[in-house]
Each structure stands twice: as C-alpha cells, then as structure tokens.
C-alpha cells in the first residue's frame, strides 16, 4: 500500500466512522434517550486503526519478546546486507544478564553459523568472560550492532546500522544487563554516539539507558596486537567491579 493509498483509506475509514456515529446519534434522539451531540473528529482514530508502516513496525518492536526479535532478525530485509548474508546473527545468551557484550557485526564464521562470536575472536572473548566469572551460557548476552555480515568485513554503513538499531535497542531492554561491554570503536560509535579514539573511550564509564557501559578493544584487534592484552584486562576488571563479580583467577 502506497502512502497515498494509506491516506485515502484512513480518510474513508474516518468518514465511515462519522456516518456510523451520526446514525447512532439519530437513533438515540429518536428514542429520546440522548440529546444531539457534536460529531467527534475521527481522523486520529482512523490513523490509529490504520497506522503507517513505520508506526506499525515500532509498535510490533515494542511488544516483541527476545525470541520474536531473533525470528524477526533471521528474516529481516531492512537493508542491503540481507542480500549478501548466509545467516543473520541475532545474538545469544541469557536474559537478565550480568553483562551484555556488543560488537560491530558478524564475521565469516558467524555468517556461516548464525551465532555471534564463534571464530577465533569469539573463543578469545569467551576466555575474557571466564576470567571475570562470566559465560554466554549462564550470565551473559552477546549481540552486534548489525545482524548481517558486511561484505569483506568492512565497517557497517550508517544506513545499515540505523536499520538494525531498533533490534539492538529492544534486546537491551529485554536482556536488562547490569552492564554493557562495547568491543571495538564501531560498536561504541553507534551505541553511544561517540567517535573518539578508542584509547580515549576506554577511560570513561558511560551510560546507556542508565546502564553502565565500558568500551574496550575488539578481540580480533587484540589477536593482531598482543600488546593490547594489558589494557583489555584493566577494562575487564573495571566491568567486574561495576557488577560486583569476584575475579576467580588471573587472566591466564
């Protein structure tokens, strides 16, 4: 239905509601049970009954469960990434998580499996979580800004991130994490709206919907530059302190 068609349908519905109301009012007057009343404005009601596509999508998103979000992501075609993906990657983990990890987007392994952070970087991320007493199976939820792999692992485009952000926003609301760990500058930019250098982003605990957010390097970046292990460990200890998690052992 085009915008013009929708507007015409809304106008026709409003007119039908007005005629129905007028008929009802005339019957009430004939029966002597009600004085004549002014005709209400049914335009707003017609728009509610036949919302535009953006309004309808927002209403569906506001009511969606985590499982429904995952189903919506797997069939999503909101942007061009849907044309090149093998599998969309909604995210995985537990609700009411102690920590939510947010990356920028799926890589080749994730595109092949439909699961987040399952390649070398994912294995490394799991070791980070274990170091502070966390795991995706028991107390963590892992997701990305965009749910489909950008070709060549390039950074997501603005319009791609904009298409996916409603999913992530709803996931955060449903997971209700005690803290968020953004891995990589791209994730921090789209979640927090900041474009600072990552080394500067690391020095501050931010807030997203009143949830504390720590920014650190992406596991893949650390695998390429092992000198980043020390600052990442400091960031992980900061996360553990924020959520009152005792560190079970050394970083290994």
Image (cartoon, rainbow, N blue to C red):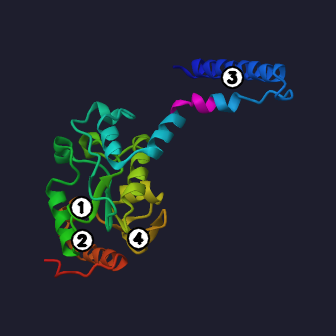
The local crowd at label 2, few if under 14, some if 14 to 19, many if 20 or more residues have their Cα within 10 Å, is some
Task: Kindly identify which residue carries mark 2.
Answer: 228
Question: CA–CA distance between discs 4 and 2?
Answer: 14 Å
Q: Residue at x 75, y 18 (%)?
A: 23
Q: Are marks 1 and 2 in contact (CB under 8 Å)?
A: yes
Instruction: Give 172 or 109, whichever is nearer the viewer.
Output: 172
Number of on-image labels = 4
Image spot of residue 39 (x, y percent): 80, 27
Question: CA–CA distance between discs 2 and 3?
Answer: 66 Å
Q: Residue at x 39, y 55 (%)?
A: 174
State the quadrant of the C terminus: bottom left
Task: Kindly identify which residue carries mark 1.
Answer: 221
Question: CA–CA distance between discs 3 and 4?
Answer: 59 Å
Question: CA–CA distance between discs 1 and 3?
Answer: 61 Å
Q: Is residue 2 magenta?
A: no
Label 1 secondary element:
helix
Label 3 secondary element:
helix
Task: Kindly identify which residue carries mark 4.
Answer: 200
Q: Can residue 162 be seen in this view?
A: no
Mark with earlier residue (4, 2): 4
């Amino acid at each position: 239905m085009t915008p013009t068609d929708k507007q015409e349908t809304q106008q026709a519905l409003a007119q039908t509601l007005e005629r129905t109301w007028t008929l009802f009012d005339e019957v009430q007057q004939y029966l002597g049970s009600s004085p004549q009343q002014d005709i209400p404005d049914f335009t707003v009601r017609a728009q509610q009954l036949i919302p535009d596509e953006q309004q309808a999508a927002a209403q569906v998103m506001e009511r969606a469960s985590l499982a429904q979000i995952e189903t919506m992501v797997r069939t999503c075609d909101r942007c061009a990434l849907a044309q090149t993906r093998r599998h969309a990657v909604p995210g995985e983990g537990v609700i009411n998580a102690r920590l939510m990890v947010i990356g920028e987007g799926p890589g080749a392994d994730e595109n092949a499996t439909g699961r987040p952070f399952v390649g070398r970087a994912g294995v490394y991320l799991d070791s980070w979580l274990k170091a502070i007493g966390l795991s995706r199976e028991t107390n963590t939820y892992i997701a990305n800004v965009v749910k489909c792999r950008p070709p060549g692992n390039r950074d997501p485009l603005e319009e791609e991130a904009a298409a996916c952000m409603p999913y992530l926003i709803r996931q955060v609301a449903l997971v209700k994490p005690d803290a968020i760990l953004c891995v990589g500058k791209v994730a921090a930019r789209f979640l927090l709206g900041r474009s600072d250098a990552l080394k500067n982003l690391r020095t501050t605990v931010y807030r997203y919907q009143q949830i504390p957010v720590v920014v650190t390097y992406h596991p893949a970046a650390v695998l390429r530059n092992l000198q980043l292990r020390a600052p990442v460990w400091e960031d992980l200890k900061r996360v553990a302190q924020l959520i009152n998690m005792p560190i079970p052992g050394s970083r290994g």
